[in-house]
């Protein structure tokens, strides 16, 4: 009887260890999925450099570099100042998701101005989906200031 009790106790401990490993594995998998979905933030400034890291202290210079850095899951904050767009339009063609929109926002309390002088087309063209633009000013576009042909923007 003592042998059976010890065997039963050992089996119970082994079962508990296997269950604990399974729980730990599940928790790790959930954490990895969550980390993979983490939103990215990039900062852009007219005085920045595209060789910078895109942080608030070392912002990128161009909006397109900021957008490339976040992919389809995050926010690009544009610091105040004038962004000379020249003859090229800002093309927003990626597809975000309803829960993870691609955000192109003015940095709080600042006013970024997209100057499209020399552009004979749209200043901003949105053919992608799930973009959210906030606090941006645009001037001197040759055609439409913002042309939206995508959905859920």
Image (cartoon, grey):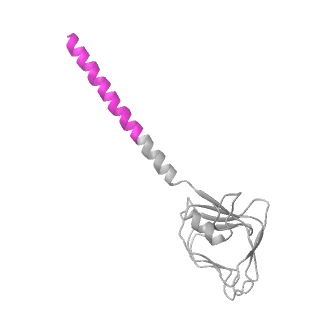
Residue beneath the point at 76% across and 83% down:
140
- Taking the view exactly as shown, the residue that stands out farthest to the top is 2
Q: Is residue 51 magenta?
A: no
Residue 105, located in which quarter of the rendered image?
Answer: bottom right
Residue beneath the point at 46% across and 48% down:
32
Q: Is residue 14 magenta?
A: yes
- Report the magenta stretch's main SS: helix
Identify the magenta region.
Answer: 1-25
- Residue 141 x, y percent position in the rendering: 72, 83
Q: Quadrant of the C terminus?
A: bottom right
- Residue 23 x, y percent position in the rendering: 40, 37
Residue beneath the point at 69% across and 84% down:
144
Viewed as shown, does residue 128 lie left or right of 28? right
- Residue 106 x, y percent position in the rendering: 73, 64
In the image, is residue 76 above or below residue 85? Answer: above
- Taking the view exactly as shown, the residue that stands out farthest to the front is 51
Residue 6, located in which quarter of the rendered image?
Answer: top left
């Amino acid at each position: 009887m003592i042998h059976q009790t010890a065997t039963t106790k050992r089996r119970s401990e082994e079962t508990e260890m296997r269950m604990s490993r399974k729980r730990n594995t599940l928790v790790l998998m959930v954490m990895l999925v969550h980390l993979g979905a983490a939103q990215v933030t990039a900062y852009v400034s007219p005085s920045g450099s595209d060789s910078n890291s895109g942080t608030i202290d070392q912002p990128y210079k161009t909006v397109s570099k900021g957008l490339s850095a976040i992919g389809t899951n995050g926010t690009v904050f544009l610091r105040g100042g004038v962004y000379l767009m020249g003859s090229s339009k800002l093309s927003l063609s990626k597809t975000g998701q309803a829960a993870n929109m691609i955000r192109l926002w003015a940095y709080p309390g600042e006013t970024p101005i997209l100057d499209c002088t020399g552009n004979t087309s749209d200043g901003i063209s949105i053919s992608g989906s799930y973009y959210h633009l906030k606090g941006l000013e645009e001037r001197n576009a040759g055609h439409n200031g913002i042309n939206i042909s995508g959905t859920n923007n």
